[in-house]
Amino acid sequence: MGKQNTGLHFEDFYLDQRLRHATPRTLTEGDVALYIALTGSRFPLQSADTAAQAVGLPRRPVDDLLAFHIAFGKTVPDVSLNAIANLGYADVRFLQPVYTGDTLSAESEVIGLKENANGKSGVVYVRSVASNQSGKAVFSWNRWVMVRKQNPEAPAPETYVPDLPVEVPVSELSIPEGLNGSGFDVALTGSPHLWDDYDLGERIDHRDGMTIDDSDHTLATKLYQNTARVHFDERMMSSTPHGRRLMYGGHVISICRALSFNGLANAITVAAINGGTHSNPSFGGDTLYAYSEILAKEALSRDDLGALRIRTVGVKNLDSQEVESPTYEENGRLRYHPNVVLDLDYTILMPRHRSEC
Amino acid sequence: MGKQNTGLHFEDFYLDQRLRHATPRTLTEGDVALYIALTGSRFPLQSADTAAQAVGLPRRPVDDLLAFHIAFGKTVPDVSLNAIANLGYADVRFLQPVYTGDTLSAESEVIGLKENANGKSGVVYVRSVASNQSGKAVFSWNRWVMVRKQNPEAPAPETYVPDLPVEVPVSELSIPEGLNGSGFDVALTGSPHLWDDYDLGERIDHRDGMTIDDSDHTLATKLYQNTARVHFDERMMSSTPHGRRLMYGGHVISICRALSFNGLANAITVAAINGGTHSNPSFGGDTLYAYSEILAKEALSRDDLGALRIRTVGVKNLDSQEVESPTYEENGRLRYHPNVVLDLDYTILMPRHRSEC
Amino acid sequence: MGKQNTGLHFEDFYLDQRLRHATPRTLTEGDVALYIALTGSRFPLQSADTAAQAVGLPRRPVDDLLAFHIAFGKTVPDVSLNAIANLGYADVRFLQPVYTGDTLSAESEVIGLKENANGKSGVVYVRSVASNQSGKAVFSWNRWVMVRKQNPEAPAPETYVPDLPVEVPVSELSIPEGLNGSGFDVALTGSPHLWDDYDLGERIDHRDGMTIDDSDHTLATKLYQNTARVHFDERMMSSTPHGRRLMYGGHVISICRALSFNGLANAITVAAINGGTHSNPSFGGDTLYAYSEILAKEALSRDDLGALRIRTVGVKNLDSQEVESPTYEENGRLRYHPNVVLDLDYTILMPRHRSEC
């Protein structure tokens, strides 16, 4: 078989299997600067030590999504190298902030298996955990992927489909140790709007647009050390229906999060991703826009911070104002506008107005 | 109106108004490496700790222009989001070196206003100051911008046009504390030419050329956290006369400064920008060249360093040798060759030959 | 003549001439992150402090090739600015690891000269050494370059062609101080294959492909502060037979080394480059693939690490499996498939299986 990693096929997975992923990665100021250059992100805690210190953190944390993409990338060579489709993710928890100098590594456990009726592939469910150099968990997440069988004669495993939560309950959100929203100054972002000012169901079109060139998304995805060939090999992709390199969906999330600054500037940190749909592919040259809807507004057992559950919808090559919210089809599935590339359901933390006693 | 920042319109500005800009930014080795990758700059003090230490600095400072672009970018969402044109800048002072780990924030004060005769727009003059985490001013600069009115019925403000200096006087240049040109060794740059060797009126064509792709200038401009949409949104720009994304003029300055190494290698630090004209736009795919003229050669009250006032002219898609100096039209305005993209008037510091006693 | 560097011409070189190259460069975490973004490299010692510490190093070293390219770039303005062709390199020794914070500078000595029969150019042989801020040599290498004469009347120098070794003997390889392969855990890379498992003559096709856009290779080459105009100036190159910017050959080496992870994951460090041929040019838009052959398998005087001499062949726009090994023509020269862009002969260190006593 040779010495190359050819990934696991559906018949190679078994329930409770544990996968220890290569390669660990130290995150540094170099990654942080590149992430700003790749996304234009301006969220203050991740931009300035002074902003982080104003709310009780020792210095600026690494952007939640940057660190997550690096952790996620580690799972690809084992979990999804032979994937036909990345079907979904759920219960993504940001357990504690990552700082420069931290080294992340990742492990996964197979938590579900279901062979497809055609006997040629099946769905693998994994729960992954990324840990830092002290062994502390920094992210955990579930995803499910449709994976090819190599040997169609291999017997089907017993079907087990795990029960995955549709959201991370607010009571289980991890709030970074020491974070104190009462030190937050809206001058840090220029936006006066805090948690109290957002309304359930409110929609915010984020105005700004960003064109992503092939170099941009491939630099990002290499930075994340993600090895999925579909993102890098233009020649191979030219003979697929896509015709060219696919933009990594995680980078689309990052761009939309960066665009959301204009309207959600005080969403200082991501606490959870409840789920997400990449409804259409994005390619180099696409211009991305985004709008957000407030899905839930939840108080915490403290009055300096609140949680907002947000749907951020990414739109390509069309002003977001021209796109209506996705609607349910008769079969219960969401029907998306053909220019919608992302429907992300996540929870952020935002400072609250100080109560005047 | 919603929660998005829509910028200020002409009628929103008033004299002496103070604007505190978002988002503060910590500069790091990541920014420094990216700046080298984006410009190819080889000026020694900004490239090597050993070179900086040879002239008395603790370690390499952040490139003056990189730090300036980041500070400048902060003013965009407030000052120029609704700009029709960036008309000019003057009296740009580099007050003290920026080091990695420093956090910059910026404030502006409105120092002049003049509504246009058509009543649809006006010119806003601001003086901006960027400070570090200790509150020390690191740059100050003036610029004036033509800004749209949102409400054409809004009354015109009293006209006040500030008196802006055509140059920063040499006597007012800030020389970095501890900087001692007598420690400079021309082997650091390979160029034997020091302050004493340049002649008033001398012209230097910088030979090298650099093609800038769309990814390059958009990465740079996102790194600078500049949010002007004209640089990022290819789709929006495709319906303008430009037809595509505009390169940020500040990045053109940086490229020309990097090109000027070949002929001005010992121009170790930028002390002031006296003024500048972006006479034509630059786009992804343009190849930039540059030449410089020595406008003034001024001794300082010390003999280790001298100041050179320089005009650096950036030229696109044509050898700089084929371009003559801009000439004055009858109306007193400079007439530029259509391939000239930049006419920058600035002052640098350069070590002098040691006097042989 | 002006103040620009116009490089040396053949008649400017003389035997034993010493060239001190500009500009010194401090390497940082910014360079390291960019290198990962530009290559997607996943070799563990260079990716994670924890991996480096597991094998006895204080923290992750800078990738051998990144540091080498930066050192190499310094020699260009003096040695090869007027080169007609880069003919070869030999005896490239990686003498000790480079860490972030180190400042590299480079010097060269002319070790051979041979004017061409046409009297218009000649071959210059140089031995270069890069040193760190403590004056310790970190790399040494020989290369030879065909350089134009400026004055065809200049007399030919005495011909001296140095005797260059075809390989760096294993007994002379520098092994990083403190490096202890017995601490290596194959979980760091996910590949179980160690030195003992590779066979002489074994071929490994590395599967993965990577499309390199113009922005990618020019960012890399600017990061390396390499000033050869052929890489940057699209306008100048459009009137050459190539028709466009050439990819820097050193970056092709880096991409192929990164691709070789898939099959040579435990090749933890490069110890020497014995020689290399850039048999065809690469351009922006090319997709690179690679295969490797084990040329020699040599034990060291220790049982934690072994050396592998490897030929890695880079192929553009064609699966590496479709390319056979280069064959010798009657004239003794190697004949390459037209899609082969690189034939690199180098020596790496790889941990060995622990002997079971």
Image (tube, coloured by chain):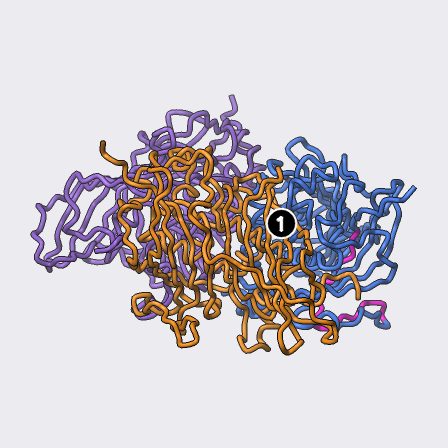
Chain colours: A purple, B blue, C orange
- In the rendered image, residue C181, in percent from the top left (x then y), is placed at 36, 37
Q: Foreground residue, B206 or C309?
A: C309
Q: Is residue B199 visible?
A: yes
Observer-nearest of A85 and C294: C294
The answer to if B199 sits in the magenta stretch is no
Name which residue type carries label 1.
Ala
Residue C350: quarter of image: top left
What residue span does the magenta drawing correspond to? B331-347
Frontmost residue, A113 versus C352: C352
Q: Residue C58: give x, y in percent of width and height.
A: 46, 33
Residue B322, by quadrant, is bottom right
* Residue carrying label 1: C106
Does B55 sit above or below residue B159? above
Residue C26 horizontal side relative to residue B57, left or right: left
Residue B255: name its quadrant: bottom right
Q: Residues within 10 Å of mark 1 (few under 14, many from 20)?
A: many
Query: Residue A196, can we see it?
Result: no
Q: Chain of mark 1?
A: C
Residue C140 in the image: x percent, y percent?
55, 50
Q: Is residue A287 left or right of residue B323?
A: left
The residue lying at 33 percent from left, 60 percent from top is A230
